Amino acid sequence: MPAVSGESGPATEGQELSPDERAELERLRAERARLRGQGDGPARRQRFSWRTPVSIVLIVLGCLLAPVAVLSVWAGNQVSDTGRWVASVEPLIHDPAI
């Protein structure tokens, strides 16, 4: 088998592996097979963190409270500012239907 560029070891096909190199090759092949076999087994149980439900609750709460907060700020500015309140209600005084 030809060597891939950048790979250490024998570069020619005619050269045999030394016993140490052969042992290392077999060890690496066994390790690769073991690691590939781990993915085929039953799925590992993922840890369930408390952060997930808390973050979901906080995101939903924020989405529900954001429109309420905007409406509250608008209503508070409209009612608490006397000049703005008069400017909003004054056209009703001049309407004969009311």
Image (spheres, grey):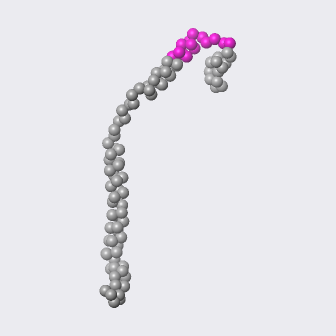
Q: Is residue 52 above or below residue 90?
A: above
Residue in view at x 32 percent, y 47 percent? 54
**Residue 86 shows up from this direction:** no
- The C terminus lies in quadrant: bottom left
Q: Find residue 75 and report its horizontal and vertical position in percent.
A: 33, 71
Residue 16 belongs to the span the image colors magenta? yes
Left or right: residue 31 compared with residue 93 = right
Quick check: is 55 in the magenta stretch? no
- The quarter of the picture where residue 42 lies is top left
Magenta span: 14-27
Q: Position of residue 3 (x, y in %)?
A: 64, 21
The outermost residue toward the top is: 19
Between 7 and 37, the residue placed more toward the observer is 37
Where does the image place residue 13, in percent across and percent down from the top left?
67, 15
Count of numbered circles on the image = 0
| Image vertical order of residue 54 relative to residue 71, above or below | above
Instruction: Answer left or right for 6 relative to 40.
Output: right
Q: Residue at x 45, y 23 (%)?
A: 37
Write down the quadrant of residue 89 in the picture: bottom left
Q: Which residue is rendered at x = 33% and y = 45% of the image?
A: 53
Above or below 64: residue 71: below
The answer to whether residue 71 is left or right of residue 18 is left
Residue placed farthest to the front in the image? Answer: 97
| Quarter of the picture holding the N terminus | top right
- Magenta stretch, main secondary structure, is helix
Question: Which image quadrant for residue 38?
Answer: top left
Tell me if residue 42 can be seen: yes
